[in-house]
């Protein structure tokens, strides 16, 4: 329970300063994150059916499907929840930022070995920002401090500290110190 509370507080800190109560009631973007955290909490506790019910409630209320089995680190922020899909095998580090229409998922049962584990879905490092409409498909590894441009399609690993864009995504430039500060700013 302590971990759950810590994660929710770290997520809330990525949004403008407000109370948890007001955010749950009035901010659909934070509500999407909060419902994911609840479904994942019950999934880890082995509670049957409830994680799936909460995940489906999130689909109905917020038009976002974040699988309860995915593992997303602290500081998870969604700027616009409509059309987000995050698959069950996805693993993401701290401070993941997601915008509308983003898909993180498998790619026709392609698999690979990463750090002695067999993976079929994306692994993301810390401080990754995913712009509107981008697709991260298959067993790819996106390292730390990466910004993926709007409508990009990532099907290969991405090195750290770069901005990528295009179909397929390719390096556009090296990350500047203030790029992530702008990406993590509070949206109105």
Image: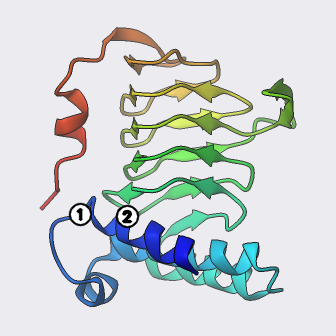
Identified at 85% across, 26% down, the residue is: 113
Position of residue 27 measured from the top left corner of the image (x, y, whole percent): 28, 77
Secondary structure beneath label 1? loop
133 to 142, vertically: above or below = below
Residue 182: x and y, percent? Answer: 17, 37
| Tag count | 2
| Image: 126 above or below 188 | above
Q: Where 109 sits versus 140, above or below? A: below
Q: Quadrant of the N terminus?
A: bottom right
Here the colouring is rainbow
Looking at this rendering, what residue extends furthest in the front direction?
2
**How many other residues sit within 10 Å of disc 2, few (<14), some (14-19) or many (≥20)?**
many
Q: 27 above or below 170?
A: below
Element assignment for label 2: helix
In this view, the residue in front, 181 or 139, is 181
Left or right of 5 in this view: 55: right
For label 2, the residue is 11
Q: Which mark is residue 122?
A: none
Contact (CB < 8 A) between labels 2 and 1? Answer: yes
Residue in the image at 21% along x and 28% along y = 179
Task: Check disc 1: other Cα within 10 Å, few if <14, some if 14-19, many if 20+.
Answer: many
Q: Within the image, what quadrant is residue 51 found in?
A: bottom right
User: Label 2 to label 1, Cα distance in Å?
Assistant: 7 Å
Q: Residue at x 57, y 84 (%)?
A: 57
Q: Position of residue 41 (x, y in %)?
A: 64, 76
Q: Position of residue 23 (x, y in %)?
A: 27, 81
Residue occupied by mark 1: 15
Q: Quadrant of the C terminus?
A: bottom left
Horizontal relation, residue 17 to residue 141: left or right: left
**Left or right side of 120 for 179:** left
């Amino acid at each position: 329970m302590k971990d759950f509370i810590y994660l929710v507080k770290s997520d809330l800190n990525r949004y403008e300063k407000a109370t948890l109560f007001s955010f749950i009631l009035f901010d659909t973007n934070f509500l999407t994150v909060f419902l994911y955290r609840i479904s994942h909490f019950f999934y880890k506790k082995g509670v049957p059916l409830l994680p799936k019910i909460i995940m489906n409630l999130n689909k109905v209320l917020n038009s976002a499907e974040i699988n309860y089995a995915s593992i997303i680190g602290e500081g998870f922020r969604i700027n616009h929840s409509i059309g987000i899909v995050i698959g069950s095998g996805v693993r993401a580090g701290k401070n993941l930022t997601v915008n509308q229409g983003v898909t993180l998922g498998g790619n026709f049962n392609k698999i690979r070995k990463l750090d002695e584990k067999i993976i079929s879905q994306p692994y993301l490092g810390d401080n990754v920002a995913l712009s509107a409409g981008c697709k991260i498909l298959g067993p790819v590894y996106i390292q730390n401090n990466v910004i993926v441009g709007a409508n990009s399609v990532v099907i290969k690993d991405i090195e750290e500290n770069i901005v990528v864009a295009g179909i397929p995504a390719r390096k556009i430039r090296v990350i500047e110190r203030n790029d992530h500060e702008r990406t993590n700013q509070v949206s109105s």
